[in-house]
Image (cartoon, helix red, strand yellow):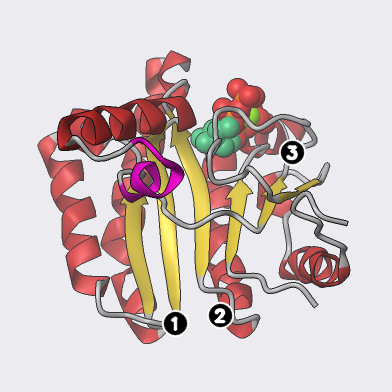
């Protein structure tokens, strides 16, 4: 049985989910945010150590301003309403990506949420906000360069936002691409692409994917 320490999910398909029902894309993002809680519960029950979710990419700024504004409004609402849930379930919140460009209120909310949940130990919940795999690598290389340490995998990893390799990467929404998510950490991840749009992604489907992962044969270059 494979150990599942780190699960990553590209939460895609919110916009199409809304469109299918004749709703504005923003309703899809709202529905997607509701899906997250039950997935975190599955991770706790399955003894997964870290869950990394892709919420907003360095490329998502290309979207219409109204949609970007809505996503960040939703993030602020999420952070304002979920604290009890994170504390009750012993979930540690960590953001990854470059949040330096965000407005002060949003940044403050993120840092406060991290601070208040930092000692929780049942699940590490990483949320990618203005995250891009290439951007993360460039930031890490710059830090490594300034540190004068030897350039090797271990030293580069120390400067990454996310330091653990991904065991299983799931992308909802039917596209077969990585869209600049956790490029370094997915070097040996198992990939699962499901056509399910993120708001419809259920705990049952997640459990099935996890069970299949546990029995798949991982080689890591060996035989
Ligand atoms: C993913 O859903 C959420 C974000 C990128 C914020 P999309 O908004 O990309 O939904 P689709 O892919 O257009 O359906
Ligand atoms: C990936 O979804 C980013 C997030 C889920 C946050 P996108 O919808 O932005 O990906 P592309 O542009 O279709 O590749
Ligand atoms: Mg999309």
Q: Position of residue 158 (x, y in %)?
A: 32, 50
Q: Position of residue 144 (x, y in %)?
A: 26, 35
Mark 1 highlights which residue?
122
Give the structural element (helix, strand or loop) at label 3.
loop
Foreground: disc 3 or disc 2: 2
Name the residue tied to disc 2: 44
- At x 66% / y 36%, what residue is drawn? 18
Quadrant of ligand 1 in image: top right
Residue 173 image label: 3
Q: How many marks?
A: 3
User: Where is residue 159 drawn, in percent x and y?
Assistant: 30, 44
Whether residues under marks 1 and 2 lie with C-beta atoms below 8 angstroms apart, the answer is: yes
Q: Is residue 220 above or below residue 114?
A: above
In this rendering, would 159 be left or right of 124? Answer: left
Mark 3 C-beta closer than 8 Å to ligand 1: yes
Q: Residue at x 58, y 74 (%)?
A: 48
Q: Which residues are magenta?
A: 151-158
Label 1 crowding class (10 Å Cα cut-off): few <14, some 14-19, many 20+? some
**Circle 1 sits in a helix, a strand or a loop, which is it?**
loop
Q: Quadrant of residue 12?
A: top right
Is any atom of residue 155 visible in this view? yes
């Amino acid at each position: 049985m494979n150990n599942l320490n780190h699960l990553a999910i590209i939460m895609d398909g919110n916009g199409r989910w809304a469109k299918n029902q004749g709703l504005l894309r923003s309703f899809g993002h709202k529905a997607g945010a509701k899906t997250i809680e039950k997935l975190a519960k599955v991770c706790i029950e399955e003894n997964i150590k870290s869950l990394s979710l892709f919420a907003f990419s360095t490329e998502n700024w290309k979207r219409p301003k109204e949609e970007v504004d809505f996503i960040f409004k939703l993030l602020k609402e999420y952070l304002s309403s979920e604290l009890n849930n994170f504390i009750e379930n012993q979930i540690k919140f960590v953001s990854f990506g470059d949040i330096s460009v965000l407005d002060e209120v949003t940044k403050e909310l993120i840092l406060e949420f991290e601070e208040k949940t930092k000692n929780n130990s049942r699940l590490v919940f990483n949320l990618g906000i203005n995250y891009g795999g290439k951007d993360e690598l460039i930031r890490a290389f710059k830090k490594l360069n300034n540190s004068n340490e030897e350039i090797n995998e271990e030293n580069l990893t120390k400067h990454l936002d996310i330091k653990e390799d991904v065991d299983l990467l799931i992308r909802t929404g039917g596209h077969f691409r990585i869209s600049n998510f956790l490029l370094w950490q997915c070097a040996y991840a198992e990939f699962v692409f499901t056509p399910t749009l993120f708001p419809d992604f259920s705990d049952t489907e997640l459990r099935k994917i996890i069970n299949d992962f546990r029995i798949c044969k991982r080689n890591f270059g060996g035989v």
